[in-house]
């Protein structure tokens, strides 16, 4: 999972180079995303617990297709309250790899404008 800041073109990986996570698409139309930084440690203090918030991303909602290579999720629960409502994503499928891209928007980690990309590998 990574992104590019719109103002500088800087490439960032807020959850590290190899985050762990899943995307689940249920037959009912519910989609669930859960991504975490790979090297998270057990918290020992309130500050540690608060810091864990910045090393994850999670949301769920109902998804609908809006055209070729695009879907919209109506998010009803999210780790970040600002993500509730509609989120538009584009996607492409290359073999067993699903590439999901965000349009330019404020990033949830620092609020700067950017575009994001997540690559998922199909489980067998």
Image: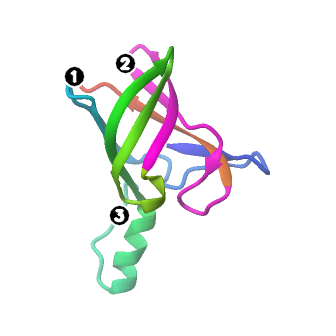
Q: CA distance from mark 1 to mark 2?
A: 10 Å
Element under disc 1:
loop
Q: Is residue 29 above or below residue 58?
A: above
Magenta residues, start to end: 85-112
Most foreground residue, 119 or 71 = 71
Element under disc 2:
loop
Q: Which residue is mark 2?
A: 96
> In terms of image quadrants, where is residue 122?
top left
Q: CA distance from mark 1 to mark 3?
A: 26 Å
Is 76 displayed left or right of 101 in the figure?
Answer: left
Q: CA distance from mark 3 to mark 2?
A: 27 Å
Q: Is residue 3 above or below residue 78?
A: above
Q: Residues within 10 Å of mark 1 (few under 14, many from 20)?
A: few
Is 86 displayed left or right of 31 in the figure?
Answer: right
Q: Is residue 82 visible in this depiction of the protein?
A: yes
Is 121 displayed left or right of 2 in the figure?
Answer: left
Q: Residues within 10 Å of mark 2 (few under 14, many from 20)?
A: few
- Residue 120 x %, y %: 39, 31
Residue 89 belongs to the span the image colors magenta = yes
Most foreground residue, 34 or 10 = 34
Q: Which residue is mark 1?
A: 124
Residue 104 belongs to the span the image colors magenta = yes
- Residue 66 x %, y %: 48, 22
In this figure, what is the number of numbered marks? 3
Most foreground residue, 54 or 27 = 27
Marks 2 and 1: in contact by CB < 8 Å?
Answer: yes
Look at the magenta stretch and give its main secondary structure: strand
């Amino acid at each position: 999972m990574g992104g590019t800041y719109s103002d500088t073109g800087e490439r960032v990986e807020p959850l590290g180079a190899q985050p762990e996570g899943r995307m689940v698409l249920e037959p009912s139309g519910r989609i669930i995303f859960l991504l975490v930084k790979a090297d998270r440690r057990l918290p020992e203090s309130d500050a540690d617990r608060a810091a864990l918030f910045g090393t994850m991303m999670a949301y769920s909602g109902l998804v609908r297709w809006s055209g070729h290579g695009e879907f919209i999720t109506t998010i009803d629960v999210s780790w970040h309250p600002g993500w509730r409502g509609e989120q538009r994503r584009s996607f492409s499928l290359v073999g067993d790899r699903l590439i999901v891209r965000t349009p330019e928007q404020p990033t949830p980690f620092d609020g700067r404008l950017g575009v994001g990309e997540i690559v998922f590998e199909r489980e067998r």
